[in-house]
Image: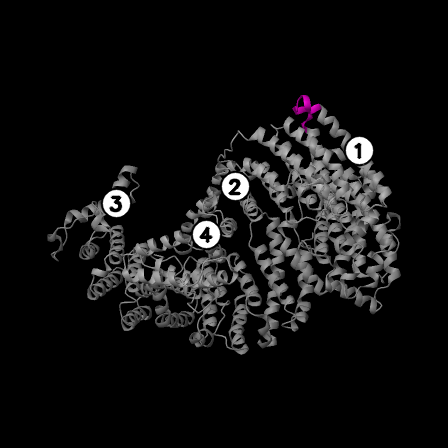
Amino acid sequence: MAGSSSGAVQLQPGQLDGQGIDPNLLQKLEQASNTILASPSAEQRHAAEQFLLDFRKTKNPYTVCCCLMEQTRNDYVIFQCACTLKEAILREWAQQSPTNVHSLRDFLMQFVLNRPSLPVYVREEIVLTVAVIVKRGTLDSSADDRNHFISQLTKLIHSDNAAARVVGLSTLSALLAEYGGNGKGTDFGLSWEFHLRCKKVFEDKELLTVFMVLLEALQQLSALEGVPSDWETLALIGKLLALAEQIFTWRFSLPLLQKRFLNNMSEARWNSPFRPPSQWRELVVGRGLVIHLFKLYRHVQSHAELAHVCLQCLLQLVSTTGDVFPDHKTHADFLIPFMAGFLHLTQRNSLAEYEVLGVATLACRLLTVFPRKYLGQVPSDQLQAFLTRACQLTCSYSYLAMHQKAAEEESLYDEGLEQLLQMWTALWDSRDSFPPAAQLCQTFAPDIFQTYLQSHLATADGTAAQAVSSDDMEEIRSEDEDDRERYSAQLCHVGMLGRTVPAQALSQLTGLLCERISQLQLELKDSAGTQAQMNRLYRLYDDLHWLLLIAGHLLADQSEGEALLIPTELMDHSISQAQMGVSEVGATQSEMVCSLHIDRMSQPTSDKCDDIVRLVCKVFMLSELERYAVQAQLDPLLSPELSRDIVWFFQRWAGPYLLMQEKHYPQVSLPLTCAFGQGSDSASLAVQTLVSKVVSNFQVWTSEGEVTEDTVQLLLTLTENRDRCLEVVKCEKLWFLAMQQFCEPFVLLAANCRRHLMKAVLFAASAMSSEVRARYWTQTMQPLHDRFQVMVQRSRGSGGHANLLEARNLLELLCGVAEASRVDNTSLVFSTIYPRLRDSVGLMDAFHNYPEIVVLVLDAFKETITRQLCYLSQEDSLKLYEVTIQLIRSYARHHGGRGVTVDASAEEDDFNDLMLLLEMLTQLINKDFVDFGSTDDGGAGEPTVVPADVVFCGLDFVVPLMSAELLKFPSLCLQYYQLVSLLCEVYPERVPQLPQRLFSNIMASLQLGLSSDYGEDVQKLCLDTLECLAIQCVKFGSTAGQSYQALQHFVQVVLDMLVLQPLNPDLLDVLGETFYALICCHQAQYAQLVHQLVGSQADTSTAERLAAAFQRLTPPDIPLNLEKTHRSRFEARLQTFVMEVRSIMTVR
């Protein structure tokens, strides 16, 4: 408040005589303003800013500010006066009469109208002050007064004076910003209840009037002849569009879910749909709003900024939903002009680049945001025209995106293309609600699929730009992001579109692949190695790259955690071909076998081969051609990228197709079953060919990390599935691979690749018969055992840098062994890995100064515990606990005294050791509630070590390290709080018995997690932890332990989160559960906090309402206990309580 500030400007009575003001004050204000605008020294700027701040604290500055504004010509002084008036009227509102308030509002409006040359920032501050005055008086004045003010603004907007129109629109825009309630308005220092009431009054009375003004202005401007070029008209259009955007993003106070109310109390985190009430129906649907906006867009489309805002208005308007649409016809009446406007907007030959993304997004939203079941109400010719234009745009964007990529220019065409492809996917997915969608997609899909293919291929089949030289291609390849990742969404959509017309898509891909393979054969026969030939090869490899990517996405989808199945459209196509006699089993099998032998590739192909099998055969032919070239020592002419694409294709295809699981399909294709199914000779031959390809790639592309990684992923795909694995173990190449792991070139593979290779080899061993498995396992693991023994002997003297590489390689292989653990091989893997884990503790001691070795040892333990512990017997579990304790003590011995310092350049990967340790401890806890291991003889007695012993051993070391700086790393932070939460859930009785220092550290970290910006997930985990501890105290009636005492503080912490601090609505449920448990634990503390909060209210009415709200939340006649009924009723009452109390307590 100004009166309490000793630095506030004190005005003398003589200054308010109506004749003028103290000239010294005006001079000082102008001098301070000029100083700030003149880039002064730091001291001068500070002095000037302090003077202006003191001036803004002046009591009753209204007359002084008005006189200053009239007499000065310094724009910054006028700006400061407007700020002073705004702050003063909010601060001293209760002391002002309605007459004075109206006079001040009218003066400011007249002033800004009389000064049309004011800078924009000054004008906007003045009209903002007017808007604040109007809103502050909403609950005090009558609706007639506001209506009169709105009518005055309407007259300004309809006047012939352009400057007056801009002032009118600016004032309306300021009113919408203040009433909007989205957290961006002026800080009034009043309860949120005041803002919500003002917003509701404005919505019910004035907002519709403002919308009508907007619609009338749109009609006037859309009727303009030609494109406006004068700045006044363009400024007016800009203001009008800004006003429209504010209205279309308005969040109406409808009786929705209570969480929507809480969202309104903070800044909106996303754009919600436009949901006007039913009274707006005529204006939104029946007055041509959409048509006027599209007409206005035509006027501003050459102005990038205005065109962008207009497109944003259209994009938000298309999301309209709610009571304005009572039936299907109204939906159609709204959608039809959108489609018509879109057709008119895109009828030009080309779009400006700033329009590209907006236009594509508009097309996408018309079929994704708008309910597709209403498309049947749209005239068929108009829908056909819209989709035709969308198809043309999709094809155009495909060409332009690749053209600008070749020119190494940043472009929005890729993003726009993705939006359009998403639109087609949405249309295809709407077949159930809109049956014609299937036929419509099949009409346009061939053109889109063919265009996408052509745009990615070099001429003459395609249009993609050609690389100038092989060196340039290599440079582009090394610098660009992986195409699989960069274009993942596009490729998925294109693959789906191809499946809508499988005959055309498969035929095109097969034909192009066949042509490129023939060209490659010719090039490899002429192995001159000239620059011209290398350039042709690189263009050829790039074409094959895109053909394989598109083919892979056409044939199969990639999903995590679900069974990989052949897409329904392709299975139906194959069945249909067989039923119509287009494909035959014999011809299909013959084609498959021929593709797997290089010497039989020249045999003529049959027209009766299944389309899917024929495409796969071409890829096998390409793979065999590459193998032949390697044998002929032509590998300098080969491309590692091609080899990588081939194994990626096989890995994606093998999952759903190779030895397919017929039980997952209601009907299967006989040609596919005979070519790829179980018991098929060609499928067995395909597995052998793929294993040979794996071995060949490891030998040829040893130094190409990306190629070998994709290759080992193919091997894992073959061995993870038991049916495929049974075929893999029949391959002699597998034995060769297993026996040669410690020989060149396999020892030269990247460490991560060797890990996965060991994992795949052991998967294969698990599928063998018991006799063969034992021999295979011994021959595979014995070299690892021997090398480990040698390494341990060497490391006892000194770790040394000389042994570092060998230690790292052995530990990577050990991690591979751990990752190979499955329920069917647990005993065998554990008997192999347990001795090596004991040896690894010694390696930890010897190489404790080498972070990569420490991380690998921890990783081996973590993988073993994660994948094996739940299946181990009690005896084996005890062994694992004991060696894990040894590991933790070794780690703590070497790293416990160092502390953890986090410098500015640190990254999360620098703390992988701590991350792995936290994960390991978390997985140990799982043993106590997920245990499938066999039960040992009861005579053995109770185990000497249980998981809790290991966890608490590690916890004593880890918790003190988790500083606030370290917890800023998201993954590390989340993992730590997951460990603490799970610990308190599984061992609630042991946590309160922890040493006082350790327990205090844990509770301090919970406080930090709740008060810091670590994210919603961390806060939920902290609250769950507190709930577990509180429930434990209530169940056992503990009132003296350290847990009970520590929880007392958190009653206030959670109460503040509920009623005082910014609230994430998604946390409300878990906050309620935790708060109830804390109240049950500390009822007296809760009562005291309620009394303090109520007593702190200066306003008696507010205090009474607050007390009544708490009374309804926890009625005295309902006991506070942990019964389910009482808890659920409390949580139901809590939502109403939070809304009521926050509307009173939240101040803005």
Q: Residues within 10 Å of mark 3 (few under 14, many from 20)?
A: some
* Three-letter amino acid code at the position of disc 3: Asn
Residues drawn in magenta: 794-804
1 vs 2, front mark: 2
Residue 880, compared with residue 645, is above or below; it is above
Could you tell me how far apart the alpha carbons at marks 1 and 4 are, in whole angstroms?
Answer: 59 Å
- Kindly identify the residue that appears in the image at 62 percent across and 65 percent down: 426
Residue receiving disc 1: 782
- Residue at 71% x, 62% y is 499
Q: In which quadrant is the C terminus drawn?
A: bottom left
The residue lying toward the viewer, choosing from 137 and 633, is 137
Q: Residues within 10 Å of mark 4 (few under 14, many from 20)?
A: many
- Residue at which label 2 appears: 993
Residue hosting label 3: 34
Residue type of the residue flagged with mark 4 = Cys
Query: Of label 4 and label 2, which has the lower sequence position?
Result: 2
Q: Pick whichever, 747 or 449, lies toward us.
A: 747
Three-letter residue code for mark 2: Gln
